[in-house]
Image: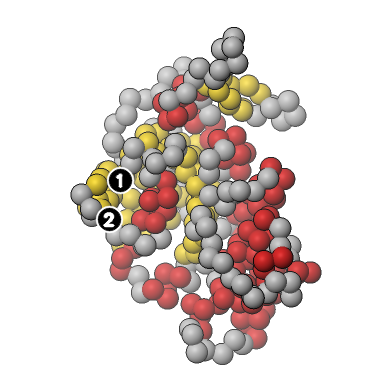
Amino acid sequence: MPRDAAPRSGRPPAPRWRRISMTHSPPEFDLRQASLQLAGRQLLAGLDLSIASGSVTGILGPNGSGKSTLMRLMTRQLAPSAGQVLFRGQSLGAYAARDLARQLAHLPQTPPHVPGLTVAELVALGRFPWHGAFGRFGADDRARQQDALRQAGLADRAESPVETLSGGERQRAWIAMLLAQGADCLLLDEPTSALDPAHQIEVLSLLRGLNRQQGLTVVMVLHDVNLAARFCDDLVALRAGRILDSGPVADMMQPARLQRVYDLPMVQLPHPDSGRALVAPRELGDGAPW
């Protein structure tokens, strides 16, 4: 049993703000008592977390729990007010901007509007860390661009304007830009936001496939617990700016542990096809979830 896993009875561990390491692999990210305070508000408090290289990690939690703030901390958009954020053994703040961008790519919750750009042009922007604003877009850049389009399944839409794509295609175009960037660690804030179920599966399958085929590290904020369990190796649960719980998916998909995260009674049931664990809110006789 991992050191921080709940007992097999399913009873969640008492909240102790201790170091949480979900695997024994060398950490991609290592947060050590990382805290963030802005304008007198404590947004994140004493986060201890190790994320293994080559893993897929889902960040869960209710609205306002600090998920997007944690993502901004891990992408250096915000600096910790206390503690450390290490990336591959080095302080995140110590990296030169271009060097960091060659290793770490980020997709925000709401990507910017890019009127007039074709899919190929958007993907080409991912090469900026390698040649700068005035550098030449050379043969290697073009090869990376074409490979990224192929991996994202958009080679046949390369000359289409981005605004003509469906929601799922547009999200895949942004992921292709991250792939062209050449980084092998991807951080995505709610990559399935506003997508229908089919496109959610499409996007998450792409990310999981990239992880399995190329060993990319993927960290993403998700709201759907069952989708997170299907596509992630590990889950981290935030509440009120603190890490409330974390661990491998099999350990985290326990109703008692998730009830503490969402303050909602849960029930576990097997998937009718695979038998893997699913969770759902409990219902009372009147149909209310609690």
Instruction: Name the element at disc 1.
Output: strand
- 220 over 183 or under it: above or below: above
Q: Depth check: give the residue in front, 241 or 25.
A: 241
Q: Residue at x 52, y 78 (%)?
A: 128
Residue 80: which numbered mark, if any?
Answer: 2
Figure quadrant of residue 62: top left
Q: Quadrant of the N terminus?
A: top left
Q: Residue at x 55, y 35 (%)?
A: 225
Q: Which residue is mark 1?
A: 44
Q: Is residue 244 left or right of residue 104?
A: left
- 7 over 121 or under it: above or below: above
Determine if residue 90 is in view. Answer: no
3D distance between C-alphas at marks 1 and 2: 9 Å
Residue 61's x, y, as percent?
44, 37
Other-residue count near label 1 (Cα within 10 Å), few / some / many at <14 / 14–19 / ≥20:
many
Inspect the image, locate mark 1, and give the three-letter code of the amino acid beneath it: Leu
Instruction: Name the element at disc 2.
Output: loop
- 277 over 180 or under it: above or below: above
Q: Residue at x 30, y 68 (%)?
A: 94
